[in-house]
Image (spheres, rainbow, N blue to C red):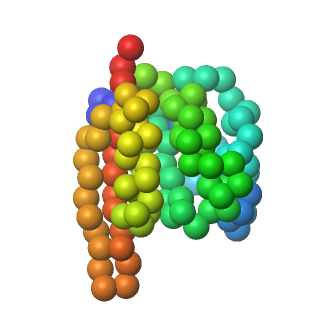
Amino acid sequence: MQDDKVPVWVMNVVPIEAPNTLQHVYDRGLIGIYHDWCQDAPTYPRTYDAVRMENFSSMKFVERCGLVSVVLEVDRILRPGGLFLFSDHASMYGALQPIMLALGFKANGVQNVSSAEHDQMLAVWQKKAV
């Protein structure tokens, strides 16, 4: 995915619990949707090369539909070899890690970026290539 000639499909998803920032996405010439992660994403399986989620634990969909359901939907829309980029509290990373490993994702990079104010983890998981 580092070759400039390889097209990368990325969908910017704004959760329904978050402020609607889609106009900023569109202003940059990108594509995006306003979506409830407790429902199936309106896309074909294995469509995207990357999914990025930030502040996952603050979203109400985690409580409403459960962490496993959301991660299964991420797995469904990612292509084999695709990346799941995650940024959240270390406790959420701890809850997410066994699910990702059970689905066959490999942790390509994990970094603790905690400060006095924030307990933050950055992680990049790669979906198993078929």
Where in the figure is residue 75, as x and y percent of width and height?
Answer: 52, 32
Q: Where is residue 112 in the image (x, y as percent from the top left)?
A: 26, 64
Residue 4's spot in the image, x, y percent? 34, 32
Q: Is residue 26 visible?
A: no
- Name the spot of residue 58 as percent of width and height, x first: 58, 67
Residue 77, quarter of the rendered image: top right
The residue lying at 71 percent from left, 35 percent from top is: 40
**Quarter placement of the C terminus:** top left
Residue 121 seen from this side? yes
Please report the residue visible at 38 percent of the width from the left and 42 percent of the height from the top. Answer: 98
- Placement of the N terminus among the 4 image quadrants: top left
Which quadrant of the figure has residue 128? top left
Residue at 56% from the left image edge and 35% from the top image edge = 72
Work out whether residue 80 or residue 49 is closer to the camera in this orientation and state it. Answer: 80
**Residue closest to the eye, 103 or 88:** 103
In this view, the residue farthest toward the bottom is: 116
